[in-house]
Amino acid sequence: MSTENINSVPELVSCLKEGDRDAFHQLYELFATKILCTCKKMYLTHEDAEEVVQEVFLKVWEKRQGLDCTLSFNAYLLTMMRSSIFKRSRKQALEIAYQKYQLNYGERETGSVELELEYEELKHFSEKAIAALPKGQQEVFKLKFTEHLTADEIAGRLQLSKRTVENQLYKATKRLKQEFSSSDLIPSDLFVFLLFF
């Protein structure tokens, strides 16, 4: 289908699903500036904002076959933008926290290879600790800290009361703090900083 005279976003999305590069470029022209401006409003530098725009549209192209023309493409883009910004922020928070940890605990300077290994060890430990949570706590915890949903949004998705969600989050966070407290990898107070940054 030719996209030369198409102005409708759902039609462009439909063409994009079929791999139409022209439709992709039209959608980029329609939405890239809006995403860039939104990123800047969230205090990203111009360079970081441009990187987020590129990440978002790369994912749009990679996941094009799963797009739903009946849903808001704008909302879809904003959700991916928010996810990209959170991931970027958490990575920066981890780097800041690690530096703080080294200063506070008098660690020696670490080479980049060793730092990467320690980061991977910490990541593996975290994933293992989360996987060990009871199913309900694990599900609620992941929705909160991976998809960045509110307690109300989690309650709606899982058809639970908000109080139940908050209770599960409290139990999950408490248990993870205990796991980190018993590990030499990272102090529990730093875990809390990483978790809620």
Image: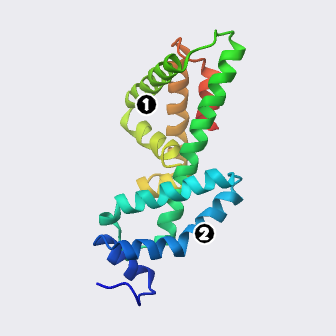
User: What amino acid type is highlighted by mark number 1?
Assistant: Ile
- Residue at which label 2 appears: 33
Taking the spot 36% from the left edge, 37% from the top edge, the residue there is 135
Judged from the image, the secondary structure of the residue bearing numbered disc 1 is helix
Q: Which comes before the other along the chain, label 1 or label 2?
A: 2
Looking at the rendered image, the quarter that the N terminus falls into is bottom left
Colour setting: rainbow
Which one is nearer the viewer's eye here, 144 or 95?
Answer: 95
**Left or right: 147 as drawn, with respect to 188:** left
Residue projecting furthest to the bottom: 5
Which one is nearer the viewer's eye here, 131 or 29?
Answer: 29
Q: Position of residue 63 (x, y in %)?
A: 35, 60
Query: How many other residues sit within 10 Å of disc 2, few (<14), some (14-19) or many (≥20)?
Result: few
Give the image quarter of residue 65: bottom left
What's the CA distance linking mark 1 and mark 2?
38 Å
Label drawn at residue 130: 1
User: What amino acid type is highlighted by mark number 2?
Assistant: Thr
Q: Is residue 42 above or below residue 163?
A: below
Judged from the image, the secondary structure of the residue bearing numbered disc 2 is helix
Q: Is residue 108 above or below residue 79?
A: above
Q: Position of residue 117 (x, y in %)?
A: 46, 19
Label drawn at residue 194: none
Q: Is residue 72 visible?
A: no
Which one is nearer the viewer's eye here, 64 or 23?
Answer: 23
Q: Position of residue 146 (x, y in %)?
A: 48, 44
Number of marks present in the image shown:
2
Q: Position of residue 28 (x, y in %)?
A: 49, 70
